[in-house]
Image: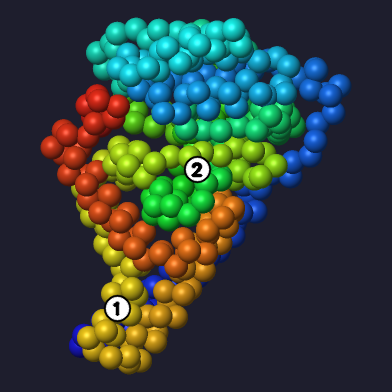
Amino acid sequence: MFEGILFILYSVLAAMLVVLTVLLRRAFRVFRMQTTATSSAVVENMPSVSVLIPARNESHAMTDCLQRIISSNYPKLEIIVLDDSSRDKTSSLIKAFAHDGVRFVEGKALPNGWLGKNHALNELLNEASGTYALFIDVDTRFSPDTIEQLVAYAEDEHASMVSVLPRRDDGIRASTLFAPLRYFWQLIFHSQESPAVASSAWMVHRKRFIDEYKDFSAVKDVIQPEAAVAARFMQKGLYRFLIGTTQLGVSYQKKWSSQRDTSIRLLFPLVGGRVVAALFAVLDLLIVALPIFVVTSSIFLGWTFHQSIAAVLYAGYALLYGAYLQKIWSRGWIAGSVLWGFVAIQEAFLMLTSMIGYKLHKVMWKGRLVRLAKR
């Protein structure tokens, strides 16, 4: 009977591998950007852009982030950074760039019912004057031509919102080898109702956003407000998601601990805050990781037909994950793909931690308690 159950699971895994491969290939095709150099005459006539950066205790990355933005070739640019009650040197680092045109905004007290980052985004929007508002996290890095290419793409596509999956440009380290699978699943399960979206770099046409929302009040307690905005514009055919390329030049470097905290904050809300859905997701992840358990059992049971099937399935999923990593990670993606099973197990653990944390009201972000929105 046990062998029969294993063969059923093998069949399910094989079918899932085929489906996931088809969905990932679709994502690579749909989210591809054919970037070309924009002539200087065209750039001069492009609309203005406000780069908006919310910051809270970001002294580890603030200087590098601002130096990259300042080096942009885009001519019509304003840079506004909001310090949200930081307890480190973030405020001083921002002010040090005043001579480079960086405008410092001191965050106000957090009103009742607002999440911290959502309120920071709202304050930044109120300060912006550009045609486009480009929200980025401090860990995000741009090349000199990035903003030019993003605006040209948005204008060509008549898109009201564009977000970009950033590339990893660092080497082999734990933060890349064991990066959570949030964006992997978003690419695969992208849909009209729940489009893929990147919180690290997203740009919206400011007037169209204001016409649609007025401000961020409607999403003041939504865990991932940019996802709600993307879904609204997606329904009107005005949203685009891009997989970052070397030429586009959007990248990020984020410690594993920061990625873990982000996953804990986002995973349970991504399944609708439903315990059954979270447990089902954990079960799916453990089933996907099953081959690694079977292969490992050969140490104690010897190599059998079951281990051979499991090894083939593991190789198939590793190749699938490797295809994803190759798109977003210039170095070390082969090593990352080999660790697929361990990453899947980690994701199951993060989902459980997220679910338990929200149920016990213990999920924190930047020192503030995060609660699920009541709808």
Query: Residue 181, image x and y in percent?
Result: 41, 52
Front-lying residue, 316 or 237: 316
Residue shown at 29% from the left, 42% from the top: 264
Q: Is residue 195 above or below residue 108?
A: below
- Residue 321 is left or right of residue 349, and the answer is right
Label at residue 8:
none
Residue 114's image quarter?
Answer: top left
Amino acid beneath label 2: Ala
Question: Considering the numbered disc 1 on the image, is that residue within a helix, a strand or a loop?
Answer: helix
Amino acid beneath label 1: Thr
Confirm whether residue 202 shows in the render.
yes
Query: Residue 312, image x and y in percent?
Result: 44, 80
Front position among marks 2 and 1: 1
Question: Considering the numbered disc 2 on the image, is that residue within a helix, a strand or a loop?
Answer: loop
Residue 28's image quarter?
Answer: bottom right
Front-lying residue, 112 or 368: 368
- Rounded to the nearest whole Å, what is the CA distance between mark 2 and mark 1? 35 Å
Say if mark 2 contacts mark 1, CB within 8 Å. no
Front-lying residue, 286 or 259: 259
Label at residue 296:
1
Residue shown at 59% from the left, 7% from the top: 99
Q: Is residue 5 above or below residue 53?
A: below
Q: Is residue 129 above or below residue 133?
A: above
Query: Residue 347, image x and y in percent?
Result: 32, 54
Q: Which residue is mark 2?
A: 196
Confirm whether residue 192 shows in the render.
no
